[in-house]
Image (cartoon, helix red, strand yellow):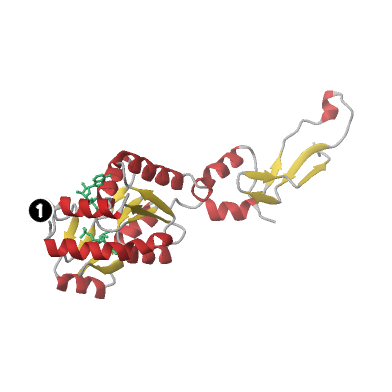
């Protein structure tokens, strides 16, 4: 028997933020999409730490927090990363305090991180994480985008192309796949995934519970209907329905499997 109270304890607690992870092979457009999503939806972009050099136009504290190898090592020693990984020869990491803010303050965060980071986030926070993999429309287009971006040296572009093929293998570890052909369509799909994640029963159950409380259910699942005694209205004396107990709770469907009737003591 699933009890109302047990359900209340699991679902009515403080809202924990969504950890929305977006990964892709380099050049597929996840950074473009991640920033657009953070501008259009109520979730914040998690600014990672990295040891890589800033690209032209990148701002410290906005795109990344750029740190030295020594600083990064010290942060690892102090346990300041929720996850970190070596990507294309540089180290990247997510601060543990960002994840804590999501979990404690109920703030939703967007993580533009690689598959190694996605795996670590999923392993630690399976219930809070939503993993989305961005796919390019074709490998030829991926190469064109990497070359057109022209923010890396020719050697770095070649390295990213080789790595992109390896990164693609990991799409199967993700919950959702978005093909970034038309940017607007891809953004719409990404937004829909985020909005959908906010509306799951696990996240919205507390609204349902609040309504049940308002409707008069007690924590033990019983509904006390303060029925007026039929006798008082001159009708045939008989039992007044006073107690309904929910014994099975299914998603979107309450099955009232026992409805008991008892005489009113009024
Ligand atoms: P990633 O973060 O996955 O490495 P970026 O977001 O930096 O990729 O995008 C790579 C390049 O492709 C950028 O120059 C970006 O402007 C461009 N781009 C992103 N999405 C699209 C799209 N749907 N169509 C065409 N170009 C795109
Ligand atoms: P770029 O150098 O192109 O900005 O990023 C290279 C790769 O590192 C991308 O796949 C990006 O998603 C990933 N990355 C960025 N920040 C982090 C992070 O904090 N952790 C992990 N694991 N990967 C990251």
| Residue farthest top in this picture | 234
Q: Position of residue 145 (x, y in %)?
A: 21, 51
The image quarter in which residue 152 lies:
bottom left
Q: Position of residue 66 (x, y in %)?
A: 15, 61
Residue 265 versus residue 197 in the image, above or below = above
Q: Is mark 1 within 8 Å of ligand 1?
A: no
Left or right of 243? Residue 128 is left
126 and 193: which one is in front?
A: 193
The image quarter in which residue 130 lies:
bottom left
Does the image show residue 170?
A: yes
186 and 197: which one is in front?
A: 186
Does the image show residue 20?
A: no
User: In terms of image quarters, where does ligand 2 lie?
Assistant: bottom left
Q: Secondary structure at mark 1?
A: loop
Residue 117 versus residue 144 in the image, above or below = below
| Residue farthest bottom in this picture | 77
**Residue found at x 65% / y 43%:** 217
Q: How many marks?
A: 1
Indicate the quadrant containing the C terminus: top left, top right, bottom left or bottom right. top right
**Residue found at x 61% / y 41%:** 212
| Residue farthest right in this picture | 236
**Residue found at x 53% / y 46%:** 206
**Residue found at x 22% / y 62%:** 160
For disc 1, the marked residue is 56
| Residue farthest front in this picture | 140
Q: Position of residue 187 (x, y in %)?
A: 33, 42
Q: Residues within 10 Å of mark 1 (few under 14, many from 20)?
A: few
Q: Position of residue 165 (x, y in %)?
A: 30, 63
Indicate the quadrant containing the N terminus: top left, top right, bottom left or bottom right. bottom right
209 and 43: which one is in front?
A: 43
Residue 200 versus residue 115 in the image, above or below = above
């Amino acid at each position: 028997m699933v009890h109302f109270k047990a359900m209340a304890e699991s679902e009515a607690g403080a809202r924990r933020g969504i950890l929305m992870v977006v990964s892709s092979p380099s050049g597929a457009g996840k950074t473009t999409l991640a920033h657009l999503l953070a501008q259009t939806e109520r979730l914040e972009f998690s600014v990672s730490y990295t040891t890589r050099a800033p690209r032209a136009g990148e701002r410290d504290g906005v795109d990344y927090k750029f740190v030295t190898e020594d600083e990064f090592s010290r942060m690892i020693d102090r346990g300041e990363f929720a996850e970190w990984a070596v990507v294309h020869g540089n180290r990247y990491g997510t601060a543990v305090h960002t994840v804590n803010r999501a979990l404690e303050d109920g703030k939703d965060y967007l993580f533009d991180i690689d598959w190694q980071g996605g795996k670590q986030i999923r392993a630690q926070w399976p219930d809070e994480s939503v993993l989305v993999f961005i796919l390019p429309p074709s490998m030829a287009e991926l190469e064109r985008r990497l070359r057109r971006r022209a923010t890396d040296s020719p050697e770095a572009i070649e390295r990213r192309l080789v790595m992109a093929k390896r990164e693609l293998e990991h799409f199967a570890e993700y919950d959702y796949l978005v093909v970034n052909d038309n940017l607007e369509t891809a953004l719409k799909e990404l937004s829909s995934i985020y909005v959908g994640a906010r509306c799951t029963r696990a996240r919205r159950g507390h609204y349902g519970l609040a309504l049940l409380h308002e409707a008069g259910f007690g924590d033990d699942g019983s509904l006390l209907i303060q029925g007026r005694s039929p006798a008082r209205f001159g009708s045939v004396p008989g039992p007044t329905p006073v107690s309904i107990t929910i014994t099975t709770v299914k998603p979107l469907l309450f099955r009232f499997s026992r409805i008991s009737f008892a005489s009113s003591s009024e």
